[in-house]
Amino acid sequence: MTKDAQENENLAALLKAFPPNSDTKSDNPAIRIYGKRFYKDQTPIEYLAEFLLVFASPKRKNGEGRFQFSLCCDANETPRYWPENRVALKLFSFFPSSKLETRHTVHREAYLDAIEAIKDRICGNNEDKEEAVRLIQSLFSGFVGVAKNRTWVTYTFLPASTNLLGRELVWSHSKAKNDIDLKWKDSKKYLDNDRHIFMARGGELLYLQLVNLFNQNETLEFGKLINNKDYLHLQHHNISDLRTQLEGCLQEMLSSLSGQIDYLVRWIENSLENYKLNINPKHANLGWVPSSSSAEAFLFATEFHNICNAKLGTLDKLDLMQLLCCIHVLRSLCFQARRIDVSEKTTERFIGNYVWIVTDPDAKPGAPIRQMAQNSFERVESLLYRVLKSINKNGTGSSVEADKHGFQIFRKISKEIGLVIPQKGSGQRFTLDQQLIRFLIAALVRPGERIRLNHFYQRVFAHYGIALGGEQLAVALRWCGNEVDVETYSITADTAWVEEALQQGGFLVELSDAVSMVKNPG
């Protein structure tokens, strides 16, 4: 076999899809590499909302498969799920604050009629009824996840409850605006449920990564991870038990507000039965992921499990889960890019074979560690850019679209969550703020667990390739092409800023001058 043939065979194995019968043909090299699909315009909250929507929705028309990491389909069937659309609830909650120029006459009429239908089910005089409606609307406005400059039907609720999860619907305002005699029951012809503009399949992809993981046996790639000395803290996990526990705690979290917000949701939707739209086809088709993604999916599952088990309120957990989804998207891009691009060095003590060197957010210009963090970011971006070009050698795919589904995502998300600063301008570099420090504790340290500070640094590196200092920083500098001399290493290895951030968050216990413990209070 020639060298080119061997390389093509290895590449085909890396790009093998899950589910196995998926149609992976695409002119977009980013989709061929990462799956269907990540997209730069998907917002952080919509990664989580879409992930939970797929998880909580039936995977068969008969209602089977709710709250499961399962596809519930035969080998020759396209995997699907049956999500709710929440049209009536969104009309009541979001129409008054939506983009003015997209409010069609039929929406205004339906909204006014819906308000009267709600008032008819409230006891009291007209003034009391109007006040009650305003209070209920104010409550649901507090659960808005994404509004921005959108029409009301494309708003997204915070995924705080099963009854707040809804599929993406897009109103074709340009087509509908001239249809002035449109009736509500006919308006569904201008609603598209399969555009994937805002819920762009990124959450579906994260869900499929876990289904892929839970459908494999423990002798595959992630089995090597468990037996690695740097991942001993994960050895207590059994894949089957992890699946059961994760399904259970996610369902419990989504049901935790059942006696509060869920009652109101059901009451409103029952009151507005005439304003629900049954939009066909009701099912949504799932995409696919690289089957080689099981190692990072295992890390993702254990981190999700830790956050689910934290003794926190639902909204606090959602904040952490949203961050986890975002960081896992970044991690998935880097893992898969490194599998394909073998030109970079491997990294000791991290299976991802890339590094993110972080610096103190307040590090002064010219500080060695700040420059290292900047070089690290540039090197990672170069890797992600290069791998797209290597797959698109014949130039048949659009490089613009490839960047939107791959290269540009890393910079956009990392800035949105504060992992990369500044937002604009030169000197962009990796950093950790207090919010990200809190996230790392919640994701990597089990509730109630205490570990040595140096072991915490090891876990952060083993899961994300984030080098905070010490031995991990030396590995990271070598990956970035720097020969580590004693003087440079001693300057850049200062982790006082990390320890200070841990202390400020209440996560650090100093037992002596030489021994510090990191704790997750739970």
Image (cartoon, rainbow, N blue to C red):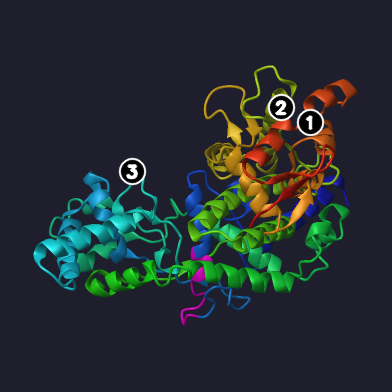
Q: Which residue is mark 2?
A: 375
Q: Quadrant of the C terminus?
A: bottom right
Residue 470 higher or lower than 375, as above or below:
below
Q: Are marks 1 and 3 in contact (CB under 8 Å)?
A: no
Q: Which mark is residue 102?
A: none
Q: Quadrant of residue 471?
A: top right
How many residues crowd around disc 2 within 10 Å: few (fewer than 14), some, or many (20 or more)?
A: many
* Residue in the image at 54% along x and 73% along y: 67
Left/right of residue 404 with respect to residue 474 in the rendered view: left
Task: Evaluate whether residue 136 shows in this view.
Answer: yes
Q: Which mark is residue 480?
A: 1
Measured as percent of width and height from the top left, residue 185 is found at 21, 69
Q: Secondary structure at mark 1?
A: loop
* Residue in the image at 82% along x and 55% along y: 231
* Residue in the image at 42% along x and 72% along y: 258
In the image, 23 versus 442, the foreground residue is 442
Amino acid type, callout 1: Cys
Magenta stretch: includes residue 488: no
Q: Secondary structure at mark 3?
A: loop
